[in-house]
Amino acid sequence: MLYSLAHLEPEKLATIQRLENEIGSPLLAMEEVEADTATLPAENVKKLKDAEEELGVILVAVKPN
C-alpha cells in the first residue's frame, strides 16, 4: 500500500489548518494510491538510491497499469 499527499478541497484544507493551529503542530494529509511497487534489478535500485541522495527525496518505482 502506498500513500501520497492528499489533494484537498479548500474547505478540507481550512479544517486541517485550524487543527494545526489548535494543536500547535504542522500536519500532513495523506491518501492511499492504487499502485504496486516494481521489482528492479540491483543496478536500477542503486540508480534510485543515488538519485534519492542527490535530490533529497524518496523515490518509489511502481508497476505501470
Image (cartoon, rainbow, N blue to C red):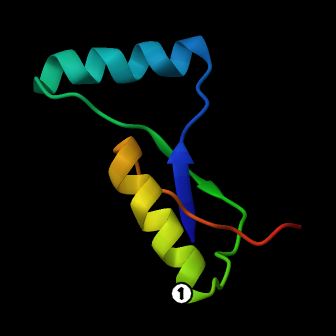
Q: Which residue is mark 1?
A: 42
Q: Nearer the viewer, residue 33 or 46?
A: 46
Percent across and percent down for residue 29 are 43, 38
Q: Nearer the viewer, residue 62 or 50?
A: 50
| View extreme (right): residue | 65
Percent across and percent down for residue 17 are 33, 16
* 61 sits left or right of 22 in the view: right
* Residue 55 drawn above or below residue 7: below
Percent across and percent down for residue 53 are 33, 54
* Residue 35 drawn above or below residue 32: below
Which residue corresponds to the image point at 37% horizontal and 47% vertical from the top-left?
A: 54
Q: How many marks?
A: 1
- Report the quarter where the C terminus lies: bottom right
Q: Amino acid at mark 1?
A: Ala
Q: Residues within 10 Å of mark 1 (few under 14, many from 20)?
A: few
* 62 sits left or right of 17 in the view: right
Percent across and percent down for residue 25 are 15, 28
Which residue corresponds to the image point at 29% horizontal and 15% vertical from the top-left?
A: 18
